[in-house]
Image (cartoon, rainbow, N blue to C red):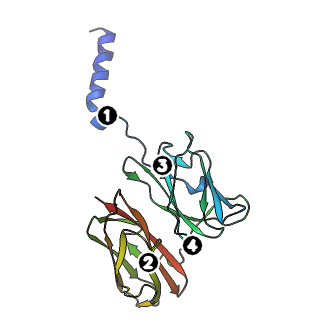
Amino acid sequence: MSQRMLTLLALLALLVLLPLGCLGTPQPDPPNIDPGHVFGWGTLGPPTVLIQGEAGAVVPSDAVLRIWSLQQQDPPADVTPAPDGSFSVEVPGNVGEEFRLQSRLDGDRSVPVDVVVVGEGPGLVAPAPRPLADCLRTSPALETTVPAGGRAVVRLRNDCAEPVVVSRVALRAPVSPFSVISPFVVPTAPMDLPVGWVMPIVVEYSPAAGGPDEEILLIETTLPVVDRRPITLVGAP
């Protein structure tokens, strides 16, 4: 048998041993946002901040970046990055406020990233402070789907060493197809959450014309420290 034939047989044997997945179509990268490549600073004129990402901030670059203000009621800003993943957008808000960034592509969504614009001049944004992150937890942690005409439950669990005072459970924008129907009858009434207890927060979704709809649920505490937990609500058909 010739050397050429032996080489061909060896290659065929190697192909048989390879996992089938290695021969399939390469899968696209899931959408992602890298806060280490994001900058933000205040602007002159109306209360706005400029948020910019350098090359590689959004991956892949054909994903759409959505930016929410967690303290203003304006609609989110949708940004199409440049081919290198960079972007620049001016959004309503002030220095020191929190913003939620999330990229999405073909139905896939990145993990939401919450940041604070920390200074008047250009500089990297900082992670939004969550001082009770190690003991006050939400389930789901960052976002949940709410069926059309139905409800979803977000559970807040207190594993801290002392009771937590929940000062506010409310939607970021009060006019919304979503509504909080439990536990607050009066949305601004503070509630004590004892150690080891779970507070179920029930939200309801009544679709608006033209959906799909999204909004952010804000869970805020005042004691033992000030904390905020944003949960993105995604309306399902």
Q: Using the rendered view, name the quadrant where residue 176 is placed.
A: bottom left
Q: Residues within 10 Å of mark 4 (few under 14, many from 20)?
A: some
Secondary element type, mark 3: strand
Q: CA distance from mark 2 to mark 4?
A: 19 Å
**Residue type pointed to by label 2:** Ala
Do the CB atoms of the residues marked 3 and 2 lie less than 8 Å apart? no
Q: Return the disc, 3 or 1, that comes first in the chain's sequence.
A: 1
Instruction: Mark 1 or mark 2: name the one nearer the start of the chain.
Output: 1
Judge whether 3 appears above or below 98 on screen: above
Kind of residue at badge 4: Pro
- Callout 1: 10 Å neighbours few (<14), some, many (20+)? few
Distance between mark 4 and mark 1 Cα atoms: 43 Å
Please give the residue where the numbered disc 1 appears in the rendered image: 24
Mark 3 to mark 4 CA distance (whole Å): 25 Å
Q: CA distance from mark 3 to mark 2?
A: 27 Å
Tags 3 and 1 in contact by the CB under 8 Å rule?
no
